[in-house]
Image (spheres, rainbow, N blue to C red):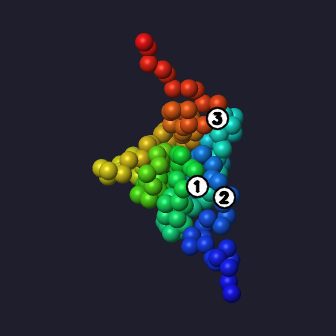
């Protein structure tokens, strides 16, 4: 007789993850985006904010993106940073599957004929009701700083600033 703990996870993508997720999830659309997003990892590391980085493409592996985004909050992730180049659908697709704040980082891809404007327009021009924040082109560090500020609201992580108290 099979035991419940032996049953396959309904969401295979979760098998790779630790039980408790980090505070920040960083997704990139391709391995070729990794170097451009390194400043975000450095910034979060310096701030001692836990994060994970996953390569998941909205176009090449949309089901995995949906699974990641729809389960991130349950795992404890509080902010998602998504970097992508060219037709950068990744931040928007993530936002479609989660209520977590999503910060998009438009990246300059070596394959882009449009120098990054393509990614900017893809991320910044989201339809009403599905917001995505958009930092500067290749603005990975800014995305991490913005994530830290979001987490800092209400004392969201250990060592974060205490919220201001009302003056008597
Ligand atoms: C986007 O297409 C990725 O985010 C990347 O910036 C660009 C090129 O991807 P590769 O062909 O290098 O995998 O989806």
* Viewer-proximal residue among 85 and 29: 29
Name the residue tied to disc 2: 19
Query: Ligand 1 within 8 A of label 3's CB?
Result: no
Residue 13: percent from left, percent from top: 60, 67
Name the residue tied to disc 1: 75
Q: Are marks 1 and 2 in contact (CB under 8 Å)?
A: yes
In screen coordinates, is 97 left or right of 68? left
**Dot 1: few (<14), some (14–19), or many (≥20) neighbours within 10 Å?**
some
- Residue at the bottom extreme, as displayed: 1
In screen coordinates, is 39 left or right of 156? right
* Viewer-proximal residue among 134 and 117: 134
Tag 1 secondary structure: helix
Query: Ligand 1 within 8 A of label 1's CB?
Result: no
| Structural distance between the alpha carbons of marks 1 and 2 | 7 Å
Q: Are marks 3 and 1 in contact (CB under 8 Å)?
A: no
Residue 81: percent from left, percent from top: 54, 47
Name the residue tied to disc 3: 158
- Residue ID at (60%, 30%): 160
**Dot 2: few (<14), some (14–19), or many (≥20) neighbours within 10 Å?**
few
First in sequence: mark 3 or mark 1? 1
Any part of residue 83 in sight = no
- Residue ID at (42%, 12%): 168
């Amino acid at each position: 007789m099979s035991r419940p703990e032996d049953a396959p996870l309904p969401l295979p993508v979760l098998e790779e993850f630790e039980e408790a997720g980090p505070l920040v999830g960083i997704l990139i659309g391709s391995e070729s985006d990794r170097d451009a997003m390194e400043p975000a990892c450095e910034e979060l590391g310096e701030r001692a904010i836990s994060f994970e980085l996953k390569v998941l493409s909205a176009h090449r592996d949309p089901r995995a993106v949906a699974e990641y985004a729809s389960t991130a909050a349950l795992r404890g992730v509080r902010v998602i940073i998504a970097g992508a180049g060219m037709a950068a659908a990744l931040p928007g697709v993530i936002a479609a599957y989660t209520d977590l704040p999503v910060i998009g980082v438009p990246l300059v891809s070596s394959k882009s004929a449009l120098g990054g404007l393509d990614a900017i327009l893809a991320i910044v021009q989201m339809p009403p009701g599905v917001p995505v924040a958009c930092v500067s082109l290749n603005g990975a560090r800014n995305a991490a700083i913005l994530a830290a500020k979001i987490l800092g609201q209400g004392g969201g992580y250990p060592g974060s600033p205490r919220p201001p108290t009302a003056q008597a």
